[in-house]
Amino acid sequence: MYLMENLKKSFIILPTAPFAYPILMAKKPGGGLRFCVDYRKLNSVTKKDCYPLLLVEELLGRISRGKIYTKLDISEDLTTFRTRYGMYRY
């Protein structure tokens, strides 16, 4: 089972977050399963951007004049998901 295998490998852990999103497993065309998270509820309450995105050339021009840069560590706490067996976190 996907959950048990990945718990044993420590790829997923039990979360402490009070919320999560439902998942489903979709069959891949070549066999196997694809892990999918259903973010429709989150998307329904997310505020949409009301301005057009800049062209890549404009963005690169602005970045080249920057003095402060941010580096984010996204190696942990990426996704908490809910299954009928409980909640888990990548």
Image (tube, helix red, strand yellow):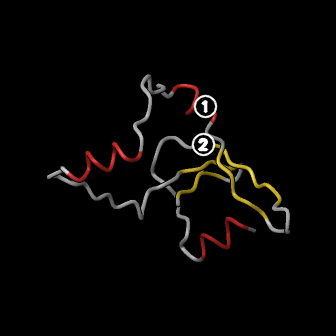
Q: Is the residue 3 above or below the residue 85 in the image?
A: below
> In the rendered structure, are the residues bearing label 1 and label 2 in contact, judged by CB atoms less than 8 Å apart?
yes
Label 1 sits on residue? 41
* Left/right of residue 57 with respect to residue 42 in the rendered view: left
Looking at the image, which residue is at 85% across and 68% down?
30
Badge 1: residue crowd in 10 Å (few <14, some 14–19, many ≥20): few
Task: Specify the farthest residue to the top.
Answer: 50
Quarter assignment of residue 31: bottom right
As rendered, which of 48 and 17 lies closer to the eye?
48
Query: What amino acid is at disc 2?
Result: Tyr
Looking at the image, which residue is at 45% across and 51% down?
16
Residue 65 placement (x, y as % from top left): 18, 50
Label 2 sits on residue? 21
Residue 89 placement (x, y as % from top left): 53, 57
Looking at the image, which residue is at 59% across and 50% down?
81
Residue 13 placement (x, y as % from top left): 53, 63
Looking at the image, which residue is at 66% across and 42% down?
38
Question: Which disc is residue 51 wearing?
Answer: none
Circle 1 — which element? helix
User: Where the N terminus falls, by quadrant?
Assistant: bottom right
Residue 69 placement (x, y as % from top left): 22, 54
As rendered, which of 71 and 64 lies closer to the eye?
64
